[in-house]
Image: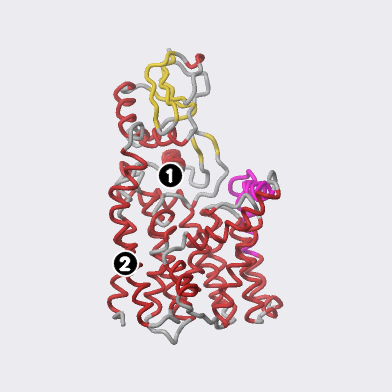
Amino acid sequence: MILPGTIKKTALLAALVMLLPLPIMQYIGEESWYTLSAFEMFANHKWWHQTLMGFDLSKTPMFNWLIIAVAQVIGWEHLDVAPRVVSVFSTWGSAFVVYRMTRHLYPQHPHAPWLAALVYLTMGEVSFWYGWLGYADATFGFFIFSAISTLWLAIEKKHLPLLILSLLLISLAFLVKNSSCYAVYGLAGIVLLQRHQRWRLLLNPLFLIPGLLALAVPWAYPTYLIQLGSSDDTLIHAILNFKGFGLLDYLYHWISYPVIFIARAFPVTLLLIWFFWREKQRYTMDANMVTLLWLLLVCLAPFWFSAGGTPRYLIPFYGIFALLLIGFTMQLDGEKMKTVFKVMVIVIIMKIPFSFVALPYIKDWRPERDIKVVVEDILQTTGQSTVRTRNDVATGLSIMAYMDVRMPPEKHIRWYDGSERQVFILCDTKIPELGEIVKSYRLRGDDVYLYWQP
């Protein structure tokens, strides 16, 4: 038997190792996109507008607010770490929701909550990637998962304050990223109303009116706060996810998407399948587990059926999946339970060499991968001169993000509009009109050129 105290300590350890890659890794992928827009928001004091190189992005601002808050605490020189801190705190928040919901759904298993949190924190996609990466996905997922969990309790208990809290959480999810959260939330609401047979709540004005007001948020935000209609962008992308794909693309996606979801939730998913296949373990499902399964199937359906759905869309659903997995895990005998626990401990241990060796080698240590070396050379070359950019690829944005925090806020790098002279210009292509190429670099598969415009 695994001691309850051991499970608790292991879950807390799994939470702590989420922090390991944060100060080690240079910018990855879109991280610099978020930090640049947060820095510009802070420098320009335009708290409701995301800009990038001076261009209005028409995106919701909350993830930027959180990045700015963390950067104010840890220092702007550590801006690359700030969005990762936000992601880790969001992951911890999701683990806490898993803990609380497990107490509610499985009261007959007093030790299940900490084990469920451990299951979530050791999921491959959470532990090794999106749980700490400085993208908005972990935070977006936290608010969606929290909103659905609170909605479950509100519908089950017919509890108005919980409904209002749930609506607040889903509105915060919208402010983090986009309005797709409302589609997921609505589908979850249909499942929960059906499973708990609470359809009459829709006839209660006390429940109906707050819901309608919350649904007005994605309309009111672009209409009255930024006046740019940014919510249309989400609808357009949702439609494009269904266009431009052949039948084979759809068939491949329909088969691979659930496989990816299950595989990236390793190790517990793979162990439960192994026990079922090789050791003839059989599982049963109570009413709550059936509801969890329906939530997954229905809420994932739009991304599953769309050939353009990517694994990033799965992040909000790993918390729900953890609640389902713990229901299966608690049906195992003592020996199998020990095996599951030991494998989760191995995953935690694996996170150490992954964070300190494997990931830095893949991303930063190999030739032509070190962004900071290029940044230092550019800063030495440009000195106190004005720098502008025509480089909007990921490597260019990462260079800008590291340079911006080394400059006074009012001198942050902006897009070169062709009118300025006596400036340096970053670009990813050769454009003679930009002036003389002073330096050139090969960085992460991209070309970087530094021009001098006399």
The residue wearing badge 1 is: 31
User: Is residue 340 found inside the magenta-colored segment of the image?
Assistant: no
* Mark 1 or 2, closer to the camera: 2
Q: Residues within 10 Å of mark 1 (few under 14, many from 20)?
A: many
Is 209 rendered above or below residue 133? below
Q: Is residue 333 above or below residue 225?
A: below
Image location (x, y in percent) of residue 262: 51, 63
Of 364 and 50, nearer the camera is 364
Q: Is residue 257 visible?
A: yes
Q: Which residue is mark 2?
A: 345
**Three-letter amino acid code at the position of disc 2:** Val
Quadrant in which the C terminus is drawn: top left
Where disc 1 sits, the SS reads helix
Q: Which residues are magenta?
A: 213-242
- Find the distance from the CA under tag 1 to the CA under tag 2: 29 Å
Magenta span: predominant SS is helix
Residue pictured at 34% horizontal, 72% vertical: 341
Quarter of the figure with residue 220? bottom right
Picture quarter with the N terminus: bottom left
Across and down, in percent, residue 401 comes to 39, 37
Which amino acid type corresponds to the residue marked 1 in the rendered image?
Answer: Glu
Whether residue 233 is in magenta: the answer is yes
Nearer to me, 359 or 390? 359
Marking on residue 154: none
The colour mode here is secondary structure
Residue 64 placement (x, y as % from top left): 45, 48
| Left or right of residue 431, residue 345 in this image | left
- Give the residue drawn at x 41%, y 43%: 28
